[in-house]
Image: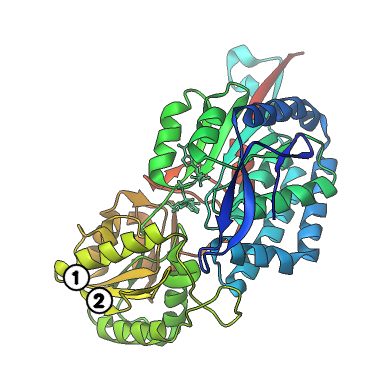
Amino acid sequence: MKRRLFINGAWVDTRDYSMLRSPYSGEVIAEIPVAGEEDIEQAIQAAYEAGTVMARMPAYQRAAILERLSGLIEARAGEAARLLALEVAKPIRTAMLEVERTIETYRFAAEEAKRIHGETLPLDASKSGEGRLAYTLREPLGVIGAITPFNFPMNLVAHKVGPAIAAGNAIVLKPASQSPLSSLFIAELLQEAGLPDGALNVVTGSGRLIGERIVTDDRVRMITFTGSPAVGIGIRNQAGLKRVTLELGSNSALIVDKGVRIDDIIDRSVTGAFANQGQVCISLQRVYVHEEVHDEFVDQFIQRTRQLKIGDPLDPATDVSAVISPEDVRRLLDWIEEARQAGATIATGGCADGNVLHPTVILEAGSKLKVCCQEVFGPIVVINQVKSVDEAIQQVNESRFGLQAGIYTEHVHTALHAADQLHVGGVMINDIPSFRVDHMPYGGVKESGIGREGIKYAIEEMTEMKLVVWKK
Ligand code: NAP
């Protein structure tokens, strides 16, 4: 089915189209417009003009639009999950979870829209401030350029569109080329929910062309990007003084201390490693296990991994389906081979059927191997034995990335020590690093990015503080 661009409240055709194929079956699922220069210009100009309308819209109306959007997604949740299963091969049960999260994310945005405020300042704390009243306001920035990845095409768009509307901004959205359908679906529902024309524009097509145009256009005041470090760093270098938030990748790690009941943590750890084929920015990639519980953890982890059901994303029984592209399957197999040749053990998996890479567990992979030090972004996990939690912390921190980390321990002092020492954006005590709910502050250090999402925190990034001083 042929799709159209969404610009200034209208569905518009363009010159070129590309075929969108299912990563699992290879079948064509839609024809997607490839936006040209003119389309991008129109989208930016429409957002620029709608920015004034949005800035004037009172908070209760912005909240009502977001609340209505939540309800509309809820009413069509099954259809939304199916889109995700089709365009990115997300197993349908996992896709439904993403849809549920998306509904909640827009609801959080609706609530936060009503709590955007500044503060009063005691100017008379300074001698020269005496006799003055001061307060701050938070104003929308205007046009937000949002660039999103393929792996959570609905909820990560919600993390940009939700706070942008809540704060009174207009948006030009560029979804990943592999996942345009869910963004076009949201545009349709937002129009139905009453969003003014031009306040959301969806331009599909080349990441490089659209990305460069919106990153370098003066009318766009902020870029909110989620994706790979390489693209994110390029954006930052092009953006000049434009505000930029970057939610990038990671090789997230879990520490398992001695004394932990392994039975209790296996299911959760296996889910953290292989949900959505490991294509999650906080997917569990490295596990450092204390030598006293190492063998038990490894045995149970492998056993549970072998029980995962591989197959069609539309089958409700499927746990693991296709990786996003054949190139990624080849890359992952190369990385596994590198580990094998360096002496690591491939304990299970290590092979592919079509685009489905079997869930792979690698033991004792050295820290310089790609499966350890780079972002795998696929169904591969490394389990290494350590002599102490301190050794594990040192290994976790020996990374270019720092998004989230987890530690299972029975000892409160060990937990506090880990929370103190781990160099990441978020530390999960007695959970895997992959824990996220959508109102918590979320973001990384080092090459995992700059800025925070989680609706309230994204609104801070998407508004400008203005100071007002009155002389009495
Ligand atoms: P990607 O290749 O970096 O693409 C992300 C987006 O950037 C896509 O819309 C892409 O468009 C666009 N793009 C490509 N080249 C561009 C350029 N030169 N300028 C501007 N935009 C450009 O990432 P992905 O493969 O879709 O997603 C996987 C990555 O996202 C992983 O690294 C993962 O860790 C990260 N991620 C991070 C978080 C987080 O919250 N920290 C969450 C999810 C994912 P095209 O698709 O058209 O190329």
**What residue is shown with label 2?**
346
On the image, the x and y values in percent for residue 381 come to 34, 70
Residues at marks 1 and 2 touching, judged by CB atoms closer than 8 Å: yes
Q: Amino acid at mark 1?
A: Arg
For the residue carrying disc 2, how many other residues have a C-alpha within 10 Å: few (<14), some (14-19), or many (20+)?
some
- Residue appearing at x 46%, y 81% in the figure: 267
Q: Which residue occupies the foreground of this view, 78 or 110?
A: 78
Task: Tell me: residue 372, above or below residue 292.
Answer: above
Evaluate whether residue 154 shows in this view. Answer: no
Q: Is residue 8 left or right of residue 452?
A: right
Q: Position of residue 176 (x, y in %)?
A: 54, 48
Q: Quadrant of residue 432?
A: bottom left
Q: Which picture quadrant has residue 304?
A: bottom left
- SS for dot 2: strand
Between residue 229 and residue 300, name the one nearer to us: 229
Examine the rendering and report whether any part of residue 206 can be seen: yes
Which residue shows up at 64% across the image and 56% down it?
30
Q: Is residue 217 above or below residue 365?
A: above
Question: In the drawing, does residue 468 fall left or right of residue 348?
Answer: right
Front one among 351 and 279? 351
Task: Examine the rendered structure and indicate whether residue 184 appears above or below residue 104.
Answer: above
Q: Label 2 amino acid? A: Ile
Read off the residue under disc 1. 340
Indicate the colouring scheme. Answer: rainbow
| Element type at mark 1 | helix
Q: In the rendered structure, which disc, 1 or 2, sits on the residue that comes first in sequence?
A: 1
